[in-house]
Every structure is written in C-alpha cells, then in structure tokens.
Amino acid sequence: MTFEEHVLRIELLGNTILPNVLTPEECDEACRELARVVDEERGLPGSTHTAHGAWAYNLMNKARIFERIYQAPELLRLIRHFLGDDAVLSGAMGRIVLPGAPAQGLHFDGSLTGPFRDSAPADRGLRCVSHVFGLNVIWCLTDFRADNGATRLAPGSHRLPTREIPRDAPPPGETIVEAPRGSVAVFNIATWHGQSEHRGTEPRVALITPWRRSWVRAEADLSRMVSPEVLERAGPEGRTIFGFTARPPYVERWKWDAGAGRPRPEWAHLERDEP
Ligand SMILES: O=C(O)CCC(=O)C(=O)O
C-alpha cells in the first residue's frame, strides 16, 4: 500500500496497518525484554498485573529495542502528516494479554487527559472530531488474530461527535486487526476500539505508543521521564519527540528557548525539570 493509500484509510476508516515495520528477530527481542520488565515490576505497589495480563510503561528507558518506537520512518511520516512535524510521543507502553482474558470495553482515547475529556456543560456531551488530535499506534509483537485478543476497531466511528458508545451489540462493521507480528496498526484516537476476547493459547503481546499534537496534553510527560542517554541517542529530533518543545515557558517568554523547551543559555540557572 502506498503512503497516500494509508492516509486515505485513516481519513475514511480511521485506521491502517503498516506491515513489516519490525523484523521477527526484533519482535522476539521486544517480547523477551517486555517479559523481563513485567517480571521485575510484578508485585510492586500499584502495579497493573492481573490474571489476564499486564501493562508496562516508559519503555524507551528500559531496553534499547524499545527505542525503535520512534525510529520507523514510514510510521513517523504518517504521524507527522496528521499531527504535524512537532508531534509528541504520548506514551511508551507494552501490554501482554493472556489466554482467557475477556474483551475490553469499546472506548476512545483522549478522554482522561486529552481532547475528548468531558468537561464543559456548553459542549453538550459532544466531542470535536473535525481534526485528528492524536493517533494510537499498536505494534504487533506476536501475530494478531481474530481469536487471540487482537484489537477490535469500529471503522468510521472517529467521525462521530457523540460520546455514547452503544453497548448492546458490536457496532456495524466492527473489525479485528488481523496482522502478522512486526506489523503496526495506526488509528485515530477518536475511533471506538478495545482489545477483543482472548480465546487462544499463547499470550498476545504488543507495544502501545500513542502520539499527540504538540498542543494537546499527552498521556504522560515523557520529557520528565526520558533518561539522558536515551534522549541523546534520539538525536536532534529527541526534544520534539519527547515533548520538551511542547512545554509552555515557565520563565518569561524572552528568557525562553522554545526550540529547546528550556530557558535560553543566558538564563540556564533558571532551568528546572531536566531528566
Ligand atoms: O491492547 C489493545 O488491543 C487495546 C489497547 C487500548 O485500548 C488502548 O491502548 O487504548
């Protein structure tokens, strides 16, 4: 599929799938490292481990393989087409879904921190869907199949301003992402989606790395979490990817270097929040 076809799919359906973004060896390595992180964090106070699986967060700091999440040129091109060259990584998560896990309820993203938070009475319960505010990105580290907890999507739902999702039956046209490992599913965060029931026998493993426009609040402030070595390896784009350049100034504007997301060198003594 060409770049233009992926763009059209995201515009019309709300989603697309990029094949072969990771090699089988990279998928194996990412699965191993994610299992290690999950094991290390199991049992920590507040950890997300349940009988049905686990989440892990802030992965760019936890193994070199996870730095691949912002190093795939075809994915970055698509993200920046919809969200701008200053798009910000909004989370660097991993998720293991175990056999037997029930389906996750359909939902849309951005309702906690982002543009679809229900707040003002004057909104009359509607969300703004005229533009793309964010894209969710799901990296299939194992094959995604209809029976193993793959992500289900309601194509076209990204265009609906309503905040209500019908619960009595699957929405018409609901699809399940069926894709070989190494593929990446990209969808508008306004799309109704959720992980499907896992009726298979092996864990379903994914990285989940949403992106936001620079002026939309991210799910996590990665600029305060990224480790200095990881930031250094991300090169000149790193400060944009991790959201430094999206920061509002915390000193007077004329003392602020917007391109770096910190006070100008003359005002470096005012600097705060460096990782
Ligand atoms: O794990 C999945 O398939 C879906 C995860 C999800 O719904 C989300 O990241 O919002």
Image (cartoon, grey):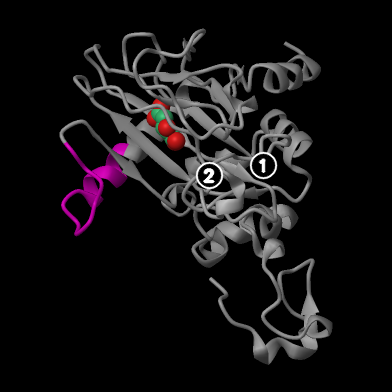
Amino acid type of disc 2?
A: Gly
> For residue 248, which quarter of the picture?
bottom right
Residue 182, position in %: x, y? 51, 21
Residue 8, position in %: x, y? 75, 17
In the foreground, 90 or 236:
90
Q: Is 223 drawn above or below residue 177 in the view shown?
A: below
Q: Is 244 drawn above or below residue 74 in the view shown?
A: below
Label 1, secondary structure: give it: loop
- Residue drawn at the location 76% of the way across and 14% of the way down: 5
> For residue 98, which quarter of the picture?
top left
- Residue drawn at the location 32% of the way across and 9% of the way down: 147
In the foreground, 37 or 157:
157
Q: CA distance from mark 2 to mark 1?
A: 9 Å
| Mark 2 surroundings: few (<14), some (14-19) or many (≥20) residues within 10 A | many
Q: Which residue is mark 2?
A: 110
The answer to whether marks 2 and 1 mark residues whose Cβ atoms lie closer than 8 Å is yes
Q: Is 154 drawn above or below residue 190 in the view shown?
A: above
Q: Residue furthest right?
A: 254
Marked residue nearer the N-terminal end (2 or 1): 2
- Segment tinted magenta in the rendering: 35-50
- Residue drawn at the location 66% of the way across and 89% of the way down: 270
Amino acid type of disc 1?
A: Phe
State left or right for residue 223 relative to residue 33: right
> For residue 20, which quarter of the picture?
top right
Residue 1 seen anywhere in this rendered image of the structure: yes
Q: Which residue is mark 1?
A: 133
Q: Is mark 2 within 8 Å of ligand 1?
A: no
Q: Quadrant of ligand 1?
A: top left
| Mark 1 surroundings: few (<14), some (14-19) or many (≥20) residues within 10 A | many
Q: Is 223 drawn above or below residue 31 in the view shown?
A: below
Q: Is residue 153 magenta?
A: no
